[in-house]
Image (cartoon, rainbow, N blue to C red):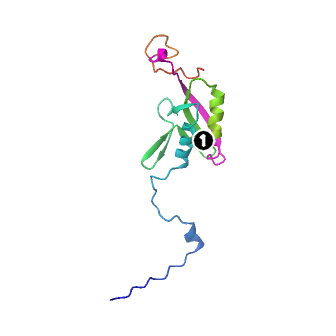
């Protein structure tokens, strides 16, 4: 029988310790963008995240896209559809509070793109169309 001995571990330098263990990105690991989106989505005043008028508000990650969050060097831009029944300033403050600990000191800009109307009699009607078929949501800026 042959005896196998372990080779001594190579010495590590400070530069080696600062390097990540792998160059690959684990797509199952949540990114800060996804954490912010989850915290915002959990807010009472948020019906859903919003991609903006043309779906342009998003963060692209390896193999996935986070709708409604755009992060720059100095700000986190958060786009949502608000629920009916709360004032929009209350909703915006709730969103800022939810995201502040994850924003890394960046300013949080909240954009409420729409308000979700829960009333069945409004289903299929836009607030500004008075009878024509619409999205079922209030016009942007309506409270």
- Residue 48 image point, x, y percent: 51, 33
Q: Residues within 10 Å of mark 1 (few under 14, many from 20)?
A: many
Is 115 situated above or below 57? above
Residue 35 in the figure: left or right of residue 4: right
Q: Residue at x 55, y 46 (%)?
A: 35
Is 131 situated above or below 141? above
Q: Is 118 one of the magenta-colored residues? A: yes
- Please count the marks in the image: 1
Q: State the quadrant of the C terminus.
A: top right
Label 1, on which residue?
76
Q: Residue at x 45, y 56 (%)?
A: 26
- Residue 126 image point, x, y percent: 49, 17
Q: Residue at x 49, y 29 (%)?
A: 53
Helix, strand or loop at mark 1: strand
Residue 100 in the figure: left or right of residue 113: right
Q: Residue at x 48, y 53 (%)?
A: 29
- Residue 90 image point, x, y percent: 65, 29
For this orientation, the residue located farthest to the top is 131
Q: Which residues are magenta?
A: 99-124
């Amino acid at each position: 029988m042959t005896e196998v001995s372990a080779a001594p571990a190579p010495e590590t330098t400070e530069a080696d310790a600062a390097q990540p263990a792998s160059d690959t990105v684990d797509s199952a690991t949540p990114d800060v963008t996804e954490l912010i989106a989850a915290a915002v989505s959990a807010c009472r005043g948020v019906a859903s995240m919003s991609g903006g008028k043309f779906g342009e508000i998003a963060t692209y990650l390896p193999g996935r896209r986070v709708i409604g969050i755009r992060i720059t060097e100095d700000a986190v831009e958060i786009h949502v559809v608000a629920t009916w029944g709360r004032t929009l300033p209350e909703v915006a403050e709730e969103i800022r509070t939810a995201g502040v600990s994850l924003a890394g000191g960046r300013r949080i800009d909240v954009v409420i793109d729409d308000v979700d109307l829960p009333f069945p009699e409004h289903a299929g009607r836009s607030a500004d169309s008075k009878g024509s078929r619409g999205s079922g949501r209030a016009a942007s800026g309506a409270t």
